[in-house]
């Protein structure tokens, strides 16, 4: 699988020494849906803006669609939905699409056809003559998503696409993302809506305080804490636990409480001796099955373990003396 986004060591220091990114490495494979997660202020939008050449990095190496980060010509192959976008309220949904189509250099006839196709895809065909000013937040996001697809992009970059969208709208957006993937496009999205990402993303990265703390498939990230869990109706004594631990199941118990035992294995056969032991002591088994932590569990763990330093701040004056952190190198937004 070739990489559509392959960036290393991305740093960004804004004015007033706000260090938003502190050396981000990220790889997004061709044709995958990749989710970037992180609490507010983690640096997600900063990273997206650097990839979209809206702002300049303080330091960055790597490529997007095979070209160096910052290459304007590559943008022709990328669709972008910015965070907190504000399209002119006096334009209709269709006009927004045609306007962005024109900016991308698409011929008039083709632009009209594409706008109709995309309005239907995002479920806005009935409202195409209404002005954006009369749209709900969810409707504006739908039009924003359609706008990002006008140039038939290979890579679609969406910054909080489900922001302000109701649950049924979020499901629609999820379906659209899967549709885009099925068309062979790569989708990169930022979101704080974890359960949504879990359903559509092939891989995720979790960013905290300007650094990617973990990335991989959800299975990979949760593997360590996944396994069989037995819950019982009556208390499991320490004696029973040690009977289970040795000699048949050494090191297999991950954690336990009065009425649960979590195992490190995902093999049902491996936990049968434990069930035998509990049954021998007349313990009623309430449930036994494979459990894996949710993306939310994982996210909270990563955020909690990395919550030490103040977000974005540079702790010592020395850190600013590095040439790569020179704020004058920044772009319009820096
Ligand atoms: P996220 O998208 O993950 O919420 P951002 O990338 O928007 O995070 O912000 C990361 C950090 O950079 C935050 O501390 C934010 O306050 C700061 N920041 C963002 N944009 C600017 C800017 N233009 N000037 C100064 N600081 C900024
Ligand atoms: Mg953001």
Image (cartoon, grey):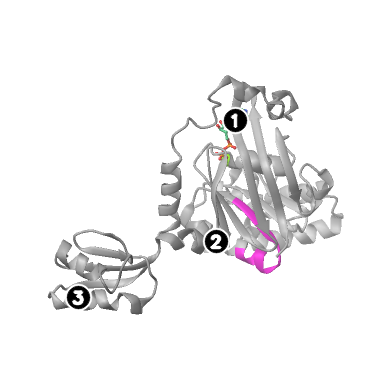
Residue 277 image label: 3
Quarter of the image for residue 245 reads bottom left
Determine the CA span between mark 2 and mark 1: 28 Å
Q: Residue 331 at what x, y percent from top left?
A: 74, 30
> Reading the chain from its start, which is encountered first: label 2 or label 1?
1
Mark 2 in CB contact with mark 3 (< 8 angstroms): no
Residue 307 image label: none
Determine the CA span between mark 1 and mark 3: 55 Å
Q: Residue 269 at what x, y percent from top left?
A: 34, 79
* Residue 148 can be seen in this image: no
* Span of residues in magenta: 178-189
Q: Residues within 10 Å of mark 1 (few under 14, many from 20)?
A: many
Q: Which residue is mark 2?
A: 217
Q: Residue 182 at what x, y percent from top left?
A: 66, 69
Q: Secondary structure at mark 1?
A: strand
Q: Which residue is mark 1?
A: 19
Mark 2 in CB contact with mark 1 (< 8 angstroms): no
* Residue 190 can be seen in this image: yes
Q: Left of 110 or right of it: where is 227?
A: left
Q: Left of 191 or right of it: where is 64?
A: right
């Amino acid at each position: 699988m070739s990489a559509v986004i392959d960036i290393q060591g991305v740093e960004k220091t804004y004015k007033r020494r706000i260090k938003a990114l502190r050396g981000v490495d990220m790889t997004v494979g061709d044709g995958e849906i990749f989710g970037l997660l992180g609490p507010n202020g983690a640096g997600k939008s900063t990273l997206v803006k650097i990839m979209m050449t809206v702002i300049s990095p303080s330091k960055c190496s790597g490529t997007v669609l095979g070209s160096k980060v910052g290459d304007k010509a590559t943008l022709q192959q990328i669709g972008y939905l910015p965070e907190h976008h504000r399209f002119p309220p006096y334009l209709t949904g269709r006009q927004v699409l045609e306007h962005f189509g024109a900016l991308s250099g698409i011929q008039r006839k083709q632009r009209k056809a594409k706008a109709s196709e995309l309005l239907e895809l995002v479920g806005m065909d009935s409202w195409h003559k209404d002005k954006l000013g009369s749209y709900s937040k969810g409707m504006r996001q739908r039009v924003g998503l359609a706008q990002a697809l006008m140039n038939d992009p290979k890579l679609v970059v969406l910054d909080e696409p489900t922001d302000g969208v109701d649950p049924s709208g979020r499901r629609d957006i999820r379906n659209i993302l899967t549709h885009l993937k099925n068309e062979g496009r790569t989708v990169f999205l930022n979101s704080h809506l974890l359960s949504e990402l879990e359903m559509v993303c092939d891989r995720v990265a979790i960013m905290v305080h300007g650094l990617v703390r973990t990335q991989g498939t959800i299975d990979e990230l949760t593997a360590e804490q996944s396994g069989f869990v037995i819950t019982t109706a009556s208390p499991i004594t320490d004696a029973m636990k040690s009977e289970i631990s040795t000699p048949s199941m050494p090191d297999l118990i991950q954690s336990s409480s009065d009425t649960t035992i979590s195992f490190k294995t995902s093999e049902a056969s491996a936990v049968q001796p434990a069930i035998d032991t509990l049954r021998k002591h007349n313990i009623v088994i309430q449930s036994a099955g494979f459990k894996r932590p949710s993306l939310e569990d994982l996210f909270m763990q990563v955020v909690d373990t990395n919550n030490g330093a103040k977000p974005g701040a540079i702790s010592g004056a020395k850190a600013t003396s590095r040439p790569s952190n020179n704020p004058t190198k920044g772009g319009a937004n820096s």
